[in-house]
């Protein structure tokens, strides 16, 4: 269980989150909905151990998180993967798609062989993998980001408006891929979106709850 | 299709409209060749004292004239430029390297480390750097190393500021979050993401630092604190020439002075051109 209790975050004097609670159970898709600017993305960054909240506690599979970003242990922070809304901003523009997808393997000192398989699974041909981000479409780039997120086989995957910018077929394909990953590994998925229809369609098969923020 | 549009590249910085960069590049190449080839090819002793030929005005035998002990000014200017360029390059590299390390540390570590490093930068900047440079060379005996250390230790702050501010903007970009989440440690992020993005800025800072370092070398040598007096450096030569200036011997100071001015101006012109090219937005603004 990835559990956040009473998370409060403020940027300067602007308070974005006030005592937010959320639990992401393994094996199901938990929905998170809410209007723009209500703090969904901020909560996602807290859950991925990328942002230290001003108050509240976060536990990953029962272990309370005390350190964030680099200071968090590698094991803990790679257990939660985050897929960003805008793939363009989420990749280093200087790297090729292959380097982007294989980066987690290199960073953790594992052999990068599964990267090619993952990319293949996501419909990325080897011809695409040698291109740089500016040479591919948003959809293709987001596929590479999903491959990168799944590389270290995380226990929890947080999808922050992952498919907002993409066409319907790419959207369906990526969600199907994540669902297959969930069924295969029993990972917990947090689907953040303000698209009600998508939310229903995504959370229903696993019977996961939907949390609404305001 | 593309051919029907007059592309920006073809109409932009036209060869005929901005010949300055070709002149600058040509002058730099000529000077570099002179500096590299003359000492290897010409078998003349630049230190040779010939009192019978002292203080001669420029002539065919001595195009830049001779100094007060009869040494050929042209030959010594070439040797002097060699020394000054070398010191300029090394000093620029030292200062930019120190600055990059400091800026990276401040930007990456943040918090207390950032505050301490930036206060040290402020401390260095609050002291006039020529004075501080003089203080540092005074600790050594006159030598090239002393000049390099002095310029390097007083000029790293600019590079540190540039690098730190770039790291701060890079750090906030989502792809760094993604790297952290993918298990990258601090060092890996610096090596894999920060340094490649910083490289153009660091390169520009180094090139800009070379002329500045040459000025400092000449200034220190002119004050008699830089290089040992017998060594032909541009600063030493201006200093020597200044003594006979009142006797009307203008050439002994003027030519070394021109040899400081020409390469530094040429480097500035080329850097300006590079900047315009590297940043298309500036280029289009310039074309308006």
Image: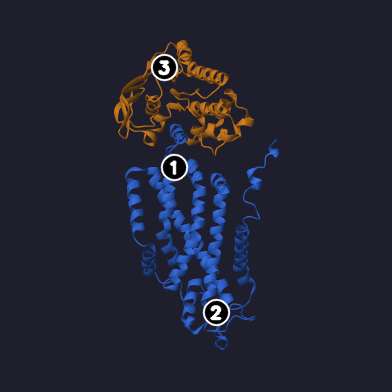
Chain colours: A orange, B blue
Q: Nearer the viewer, mark 1 or mark 2?
A: 2
Can you give x and y, in whole percent of width and height, for residue B112 in the image?
32, 45
Is label 2 on the same chain as label 3?
no
The residue indicated by pointer 2 is: B47
Q: Residue at x 30, y 33 (%)?
A: A13
Q: Residues within 10 Å of mark 3 (few under 14, many from 20)?
A: many
Q: Is residue A26 something that shows in the picture?
A: no
Residue A97: image tag? none
Is label 1 on the same chain as label 2?
yes
Cα distance in 3D space between marks 1 and 2:
51 Å
Q: Secondary structure at mark 2?
A: loop
| Residue toward you, B123 or B20 | B20
The residue indicated by pointer 3 is: A30
| Residue toward you, A50 or A133 | A133
Q: Residues within 10 Å of mark 2 (few under 14, many from 20)?
A: some
Residue B187: image tag? 1
| Residue toward you, B106 or B28 | B28
Q: Residues within 10 Å of mark 1 (few under 14, many from 20)?
A: few
């Amino acid at each position: 269980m990835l559990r956040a209790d009473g998370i409060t975050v403020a940027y300067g004097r602007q308070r974005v989150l006030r005592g937010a609670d959320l639990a992401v159970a393994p094996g199901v898709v938990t929905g998170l909905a809410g209007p723009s600017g209500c703090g969904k993305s901020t909560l996602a960054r807290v859950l991925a151990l990328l942002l230290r909240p001003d108050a509240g506690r976060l536990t990953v599979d029962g272990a309370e998180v005390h350190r964030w970003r680099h200071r968090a242990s590698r094991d803990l922070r790679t257990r939660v993967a985050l897929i960003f809304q805008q793939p363009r901003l989420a990749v280093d523009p200087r790297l090729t798609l292959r380097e982007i997808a294989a980066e987690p393997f290199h960073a953790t000192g594992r052999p990068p062989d599964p990267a090619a398989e993952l990319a293949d699974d996501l419909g990325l041909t080897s011809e695409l993998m040698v291109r740089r981000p500016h040479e591919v479409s948003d959809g293709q780039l987001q596929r590479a980001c999903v491959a990168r997120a799944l590389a270290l086989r995380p226990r929890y995957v947080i999808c922050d408006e992952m498919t907002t910018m993409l066409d319907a077929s790419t959207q369906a394909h990526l969600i199907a891929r994540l669902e297959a990953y969930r069924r295969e590994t029993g990972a917990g998925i947090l689907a953040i979106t303000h698209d009600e229809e998508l939310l229903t369609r995504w959370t229903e098969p696993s019977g996961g709850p939907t949390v609404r923020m305001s | 299709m593309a051919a029907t549009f007059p592309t920006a590249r073809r109409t932009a910085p036209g060869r005929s409209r901005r010949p300055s960069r070709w002149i600058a590049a040509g002058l730099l190449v000529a000077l570099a060749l002179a500096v590299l080839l003359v000492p290897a090819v010409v078998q003349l002793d630049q230190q040779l004292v010939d009192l019978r030929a002292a203080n001669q005005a420029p002539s065919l035998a001595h195009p830049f004239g001779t100094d007060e002990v009869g040494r050929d000014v042209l030959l010594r200017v070439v040797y002097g430029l060699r020394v000054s360029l070398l010191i300029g390059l090394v000093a620029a590299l030292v200062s930019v390297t120190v600055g990059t390390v400091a800026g990276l540390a401040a930007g990456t570590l943040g918090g207390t480390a950032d505050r301490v490093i930036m206060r040290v930068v402020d401390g260095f900047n609050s002291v006039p750097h020529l004075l501080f440079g003089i203080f540092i060379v005074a600790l050594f005996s006159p030598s090239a190393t002393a000049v390099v250390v002095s310029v390097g230790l007083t000029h790293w702050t600019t590079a540190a500021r540039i690098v730190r501010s770039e790291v701060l903007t890079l750090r906030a970009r989502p792809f760094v979050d993604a790297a952290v989440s993918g298990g990258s440690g601090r060092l890996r992020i610096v090596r894999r993401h920060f340094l490649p993005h910083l490289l153009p800025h660091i390169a520009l800072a180094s090139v800009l630092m070379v002329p500045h370092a040459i000025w400092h070398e000449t200034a220190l040598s002119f004050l008699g604190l830089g290089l040992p007096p017998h060594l032909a450096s541009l600063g030493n030569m201006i200093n020597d020439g200044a003594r006979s200036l009142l006797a009307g011997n203008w050439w002994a100071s003027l030519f070394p002075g021109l040899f400081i001015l020409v390469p530094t101006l040429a480097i500035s012109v080329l850097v300006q051109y590079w900047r315009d090219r590297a940043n298309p937005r500036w280029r289009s603004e310039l074309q308006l």
